[in-house]
Amino acid sequence: MVEAFVLIQTEVGRAEVVAKQLAALSGVLSSEYVTGPYDVVARVGAATLDELTTSVVPKVQQVTGITRTLTCPVGS
């Protein structure tokens, strides 16, 4: 399995709602709203890197209220 952290910036006041919506998506292993330069941190996973980048991450990016993401693959 290939995993990554997705660091997410949201519209003002949307972090909690976005984190809950992300948690319901397939491929999202965990989703938490946080304080600091990013509003939500999600851990995502897929069987292959290709699946992660073409299926899981785009679904995350389409959630309403997200303004920017940064995907950080986890080394093994």
Image (cartoon, rainbow, N blue to C red):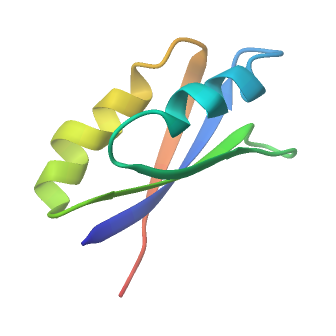
- Give coordinates of residue 45: x percent, y percent: 33, 59
Q: Residue at x 67, y 23 (%)?
A: 10
- Report how many numbered discs are placed on residues in the image: 0
Residue 7, above or below 17: below
In the rendered view, does 56 fall on the left or right side of 54? Answer: right
In the rendered view, does 55 fall on the left or right side of 45? Answer: left
Q: Residue at x 20, y 38 (%)?
A: 55
Q: Residue at x 42, y 73 (%)?
A: 74
Farthest bottom residue in view = 76
What quarter of the picture does the N terminus occupy?
bottom left
What quarter of the picture does the C terminus occupy?
bottom left
Q: Observer-nearest residue: 70 or 14?
A: 14
Q: Residue at x 60, y 14 (%)?
A: 65
Occupied quadrant, residue 26 = top left
- Give coordinates of residue 16: x percent, y percent: 76, 28
Q: Observer-nearest residue: 72 or 13?
A: 13
- Give coordinates of residue 51: x percent, y percent: 15, 50
Residue 60, above or below 32: above
In the rendered view, does 32 fall on the left or right side of 56? Answer: right
Residue 63, above or below 24: above
In the rendered view, does 7 fall on the left or right side of 72? Answer: right
Farthest front residue in view = 24
- Give coordinates of residue 12: x percent, y percent: 81, 15
